[in-house]
Amino acid sequence: MGFPLNKAFIGLWILLWILATSGCLSYRVLREVEGSPVAAPSEALRIGSTTMQDVLTLYGAPSRIVPLEGRDLFMYTQSVYVQNSIAFGIPLTDFAGSSVSFSGYTNLTRYDLLAMVFTPEGILEDMVFEKGSGLPYLETLFKDDSGKKAAPVP
Amino acid sequence: MKKRMAAFLGVIGLWAAVGVGCTVIGKTKEYQPFDPSKFQSLMPGKTRAADVTQLFGAPTEVVKLSNGNAYIYRRAVTKGTALWLVLLTLGNFDTQYDQVALFFDSENVLSHYGVSLNAEQTAYGLPFK
């Protein structure tokens, strides 16, 4: 008959333990999205014939307009930033003279980007599309290709 | 009686677990007072840069292009949601823009323009998608 009460007490003690240590251990997930989703290049876009007006009609105002040397660049972008962090600490300074603490975090920003270069006459000359938000989180985060050198230009 | 006590303690425990959490929602606006209904009056080939500034005020940004200028009007809305649970903190920020890009030729006559109105799609939410 005493079983449910014991179970409740155990549950209560677990909750009390969680509450008491909640200042010591924390896990945080943060996500920041900037901009609207970037659509892949439409079939209607043709290098050499599509005009700036056609692009503005299809995609609206670009996120950025950059003047190049004799060319104009439209950039449609969306960025997705994700941060995961964990922190653990036990304040023992009053007893032991120092405290135990540990923390770690990962930050990853992925971009979707459609870049279009126009001639001074407003004709589409080149375009590049990158769908960064589709990349897997952990694989992208831990893939280390920062030290790789570019192939020498012959 | 003991069952009722167990249920009572369970409710207290649940309330304590949920009650220590906190939720915050916030909204930030970068305001630019352009009126989208006035875009109907823009006429490529006729409207001049001075007419545009009369209608919409000073642009947020001006870009010198290879064959003229671009006036950019931009405003942003950010919605933030944060949820603190016992051991877990969740935060989500969404920023969307209303943006208009107007292109003028070397004579300052409007050649074409593009409009993206997405600020209303800004949403509160959790950081999982």
Image (spheres, helix red, strand yellow):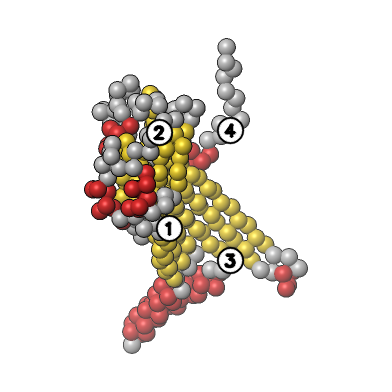
Instruction: Please tell me if label 2 and label 4 are on a single chain.
Output: no
Tell which subunit mark 3 falls on: A
The amino acid sitting under disc 3 is Cys
From mark 3 to mark 1, how far is it between C-alphas? 37 Å
From mark 1 to mark 4, how far is it between C-alphas? 36 Å
Q: What residue do we see at 60% from left, 56% from top?
A: A103
Instruction: Please tell me if label 2 and label 3 are on a single chain.
Output: no
Q: Are marks 3 and 1 in contact (CB under 8 Å)?
A: no
The amino acid sitting under disc 2 is Ser
| Residue, disc 3 | A24
User: Residue A44 appears at what percent x and percent y?
Assistant: 25, 28
Tell which subunit mark 2 falls on: B
- Residue B106's tag is 2
Q: What residue do we see at 66% from left, 68% from top?
A: A91
Tell which subunit mark 1 falls on: B
The amino acid sitting under disc 4 is Ser
* Mark 2 closeness class: few <14, some 14–19, many ≥20 residues within 10 Å: few
